[in-house]
Image: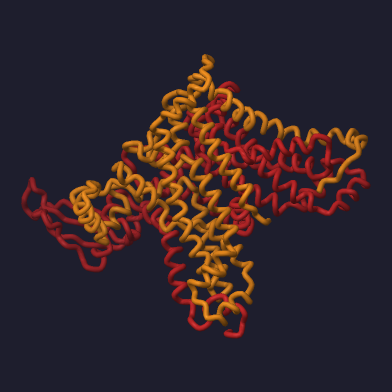
Amino acid sequence: MSTSPKDAVGSRKRSDWLKHVFILGIILIELFPLYMMLQISLKDNASFIQNPWLPQPPYAVTEHFRDPAVGTDSQLLTRLRTATWTEVFGGVTAPRDDPDFVSATTHFTLSVYRVENWRVGFKTILPAIANTIFIAATGTAVSMALAILGAYFFARYRMPFSGVLWAAFMLLMLMPGVANIVPLFTLLKDMNLLNTLAAIILVGIAGGQVFNIFVLRNFIEDLPKDLFEAAEMDGASHLQQIWTVVIPLSMPIIGTLSILAFLGKWNEFLLPLIVLRDQELFPLGVKLIYLDGEYVKQWGPIMAAYFIASMPLIVIFLFCMRLFVRGLSAGAVKG
Amino acid sequence: MALPLSRQKALREWKLYFFILPSLLFVAVFSYFPAGSAIYHSFFDWQGGDNKELIGFANFKRILGDPVLWSAFGTVSVLIVFNLFKMIPSIMLAVLIHRLKSDRAQYGYRTLLVVPMIVPGLVTLFIWKFFFDPNLGILNNLFDVTGLKTLLVHLDQFFGWNVFFASAPIGWLSQPDLILPALFLWGFPWIGAVGVLIYLAGLQSIGQEVYEAADLDGVGPFQKFIYIELPLILTQVRLTLVLLIIGTLKDYGLQLLLLGEAGGPGGRGMVPGLWMYNRAFIAGEFGYACAVGMVLFVFILSLTYVNNKYVRVEK
């Protein structure tokens, strides 16, 4: 291998194991929140406090106590609790300050895993996920459709006023949306759209237009002109040209942009937080905020809910890994 | 480029305008109108209702003397410095991955890097908030186990910070003096998968002969970074730098969810965006909030201008 040009990148003689250790270490820390999420989701608060770091061992402890009211060993109170790792390997020791303790045994059981956390998590978060999928899917689809039409307008011919319109769109790209949120709220109030999902969807559609049109226009302009001319010869209308030429050829970029748009809407929380009041309308973001705001928290179900909230993205990630990675880089160049 | 058209052909193609109309309508109603409305209302005393009173530049005069807003700008400057520092690990990781000999390993690590990205941002935020919890939180647990807390308590007694106490858990988000350090620790080890991927893309353009020449000259690994890798990813670094500054200046979601509308105890986590939100939706001073938004907007716009003028991105 020493003759391969690749070797010149690193230092030639030393091996890479130190780098691997370092990179793996960093990636493990990065994955740590995911790990915590998963392992806490199977615990209740008591066993989490008792053993915060490691997954629950599949053992339970049965403890026997003297009943203080009776005072003899004839009638014992039993208590069942989850075991810690030291108890699994080192045996159970008596609680230091409890004179009534008699004996304890550990035994193997899978019932220490709180599967019902996941059931509770599902029940809490599922309506919110449904809302979010509805918002994100509708918003993304409409937004992409409009953006394709708009990009086609800019890319196909240089129409009168298209320069002015283009400038008007690009100006928005420079404009940060930060000052908008206050007037947007009153606008939605005037349109009677407060507390509706339509408000979130409509604003979302508008927000994605500029960037999508910008990217799509460049892409469509690079398509071979002959294809459009051939289609026109065959009597295809503009809509038909979009359907038969533009969309099939720009599928990769449309996919990438759609994923970006979908991700953006999945993570959105500020506008819904301001606009929505009814619990059943809450998308994921607002729902998570409300979960976090509860006074006494059961961490198990909450972590399960967090994990469930990530699952649709995991599915998308598995199926469109390549688009995903490209989309992330494109999104970073966006500005 | 789009084909130029004669006037007659353009007239015949008038239907094409319907293609741009929906986008235009959306953008006009939901982007341009609010923006214009924000400028307009920044000159009014406005509670969000129908009654408003033109007060000229009074809102802006009030901004000049608003101590909360200016300390918020101070806070956000500190956060920007933090975030600039937090770019370093991503660059280092990208260089490390790039220097690996095996292509398979490089690809594997790239994929592994993207995995945490599938967790929605809000979930990451809340998990970190949970890490910071004084009683149950992982961070305090870790500090106890490793003895870092004892060290901090000793340092505290030595310097007289009055922040860390042996008897009480560390209140990361409840001690005013700890809010900025907590925001610094936030997101450790500060790897942005997007950043790493961009840097890697930049590093890929470095030719092998550059490294070979460096090897012949006996250049060490650190010098290789300074003289070969850093100059070649400087475009990407500059780009992320500007985007990062603008993003930090603009965002207030983190502070809102982590510390609440008032910016946490003592308002130490207050940033300009959050102050705007606070004035509008907590105090009901919509006109003043619009003015704050305008000031923030001017800051961001000038940064965007600098970005477009001096940072060229070759696509």
Above or below, A110 against B16 in this view is below
Q: Colour of chain B?
A: orange
Tell me which residue sits at (43%, 30%) in the image.
B278
Tell me what residue is drawn at x 69 percent, y 42 percent. A144
- Give the residue at x 70% y 49%: A254
Along the line of sight, which residue is nearer the eye, B217 or A147? B217
Query: Residue B256: x and y, percent?
Result: 42, 38
> Residue B139 falls in which quadrant of the image?
bottom left
Left or right of B212? Residue B174 is left
Q: Which chain is red?
A: A
B241 relative to A303 in the view: left or right:
right
Q: Where does the image place residue B153, in percent across and percent down from the top left?
A: 22, 54
Q: Viewed as shown, does residue A256 lie left or right of B135?
A: right
Residue A320 placement: quadrant = bottom right
* Position in image of residue B270 (x %, y %): 40, 38
Identify the image quadrant of the C terminus of chain B.
bottom right
Please state which of residues A37 and B64 is positioned toward the viewer in this rendering.
B64
Image position of B62 with respect to A216: above or below: above
Viewer-side residue, A218 vs B296: B296
The residue depicted at 70 percent of the width and 45 percent of the height is A214
Q: Which of these two is toward me, B301 or A265?
A: B301
